[in-house]
Amino acid sequence: MKKHSFYLELGAAGICLKFSCSRFAAQARQHIFLSKDFNGRIVGSIEYMEDDSVSRMIRVPCKPNVVHIAKEDLGKGHQTILLRMFDKFTIALDVQKNRVTVRYPSDAPIRLMLDDVLQAALQPILDRQGGFILHGSCMVYKGIAVVFMGNSGSGKSTTAFNLIRFGFHCYADDAVLVTPVGDALWAWPLAREFSIRPLSFRLFREHGVRIGDYKKDGEKYYFSQDFEKYSGAIIKHICFVEVSGEAETNIICLNPEETLQILLQENRHFSFMGRQSARVYSKTLAQKVPMPLRACVGINLDSQGSALKNIVTGHAPPSVKKCSAISFDVGRKQKISLIQRAWSNAGQEPLEKLIPLLGDFDLKVFTLALGFFQTYPLAHIEPVEAPFSNGIIPPKFEASWLRAANWVEGCQKLLLLTGVEVLERFALAWIKSAPFIYPFLKVLTSLDPEKSEQVEKAWNLYKGENSKSDNNDSKSIKIHLSNFQNVFARSNPAFQDWRSSLLSSKNEISHIYCWITQGEHLGRKDMLALFKIIRKIPMLTVVPVGLNNKDIFTTPIEFVRFALECGLRPKISRLTPLCCLSNEDANFLLNGGAFERRTREGEARLPDNNMFWLEKPYSACKSCGFYSLGFCRGGFFSNK
């Protein structure tokens, strides 16, 4: 079998890579910097061999988001290393001094072989050269290298990618090859392709940065680069990156002690194969890198790139003031504080400001916002099956505990912040965390087919996942009636359309939600016509919607009373602020078993019965007896 040999150059030294597959070899040359000919000293070799038998070598269950490593030392520089990658692929490395044989299954992705597996194979060879692999991005300007390091979402790849516009070359996207040359550390080119995530892609588009050719693979956007010189660059800076959320970028200089302290806090600054030696590598970096930096990067891309270039070229030295965490978190702290305040302001959460954070560029803020909506009860109201047909949110749809106007404004800002690519990546996560967001996104994207398509695609995926979780029950579809414009009137075309849809699909419906406003006038003939249609549907939930939380919900209660008289078993939504019910109505609903109750696995039982606490009550609800009985979820109204 013909071997395809190429060389990874480390100055006067080189590492030979051999591939048995021509397609593998071609993709390797596209993905990493390899030369065909090399006349220097060969310090190691890596040979890839396809071997499906390795899939049976690790049978223990592994976590899907990590790499499981099993080593066996056979002596005299010979060891075997088994890698279980993300609980999908097993790869075997046979290490004999400076020679590494990689055996991989035929279904393993080539990109995986050229990223994580290549790093694993390189590490034992680099060890013998006194080198190692840093987890970060490396950018080079006129022979000077700056390595950006930080946790996932810190902005290192985005910052590095931005510097391409300022004349920098990318030597590494995720793994930086480092070897000692004299008293200095040098970085060597590895990655021909550079990747950014959807939020970063959106940031560049919003700032009018012209983005060239790219290809999408999974959730990342990949950009190719090509430059002729394969020479190394001296590492003058390592830069610990954080996202501020502010416009401007602030950069400070660190001393060796501060640098070592940061490096020792987190061994993930190094490749997963070298983390057992993280302490040694950290001391080497702190001693040999002349000017370590810490950057609080802002979203003004021009200012960000200019500030970093001026430091690398020596035109503007960084600040030498004492490193302070406070100076790096101004913008982020404001957003996090907004989320924290929302937890303690029931009924007055600033939804119009919180919803846009679901598309925030700062990954930490984005994650916290997502977490808020995952546990925010009002976000879990199931939306209408088909949003308002005329694309207009009814003006009276503004109960203080529901506040649709705030949802609309927040969703408008969110859509302004995000492009189609971000919707494709995150819309499903938004809907999972806040199902109520769907109808507003759908209505607001009605004039933008691309965005509307992504919203609808995410909604269908959400419904499909819910259907699977219900053990594939064919009767899991929920139909929701929005009846804000006297839709119960039998002469209203909207009612006739809804009635027809019920008659044609009633065998598939298990639950109907009726949203009833206080201002509607429901005649018994109209209600009776409705009840005849839905009599065989197992569940009917009434959601009272008032203009403010001082309304007494007489119309929805009359609807429930008549439904009970007609033999139906309606429930009034537990999202109803029970302080809006009169004592007479509350007693009637309680005695008639018409309160919706839901228990969830893992919640603490009440001491005297079989009900469950639904959540910690808000302060305004502690004296309300309905909460302790499990009827009212509490907190969905304001005392003001």
Image (cartoon, helix red, strand yellow):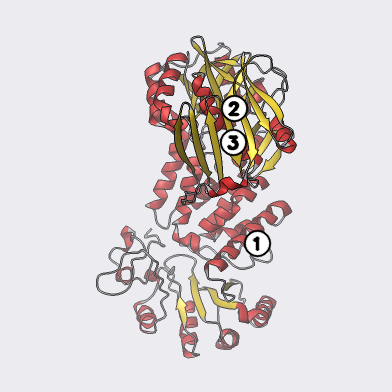
432 w.r.t. 212: above or below: below
Give whichever of discs 3 and 2 has the lower sequence position: 3
Task: Please name which of the two marks, 3 or 2, marks the residue nearer to the observer.
Answer: 3
Q: Mark 2 points at which residue?
A: 160
In the figure, is residue 365 to the left or right of 461? left
Q: Nearer the viewer, mark 2 or mark 1?
A: 2
Q: What residue type is labelled 3?
A: Val
How many residues crowd around disc 2 within 10 Å: few (fewer than 14), some, or many (20 or more)?
Answer: many
Q: Which corner quadrant holds the N terminus? A: top right
Name which residue type carries label 1. Ile
Residue 392: mark in rendering:
1
Q: Which residue lies furthest to the left in this view?
A: 608
Q: Residue at x 37, y 72 (%)?
A: 631
**Against 600, is 274 above or below?**
above
Residue 613 in the image, given as x and y percentages of width and height: 33, 66
| Mark nearer the N terminus (1 vs 3) | 3
Q: Residue furthest top?
A: 182
**Residue 317: % across, % down:** 51, 13
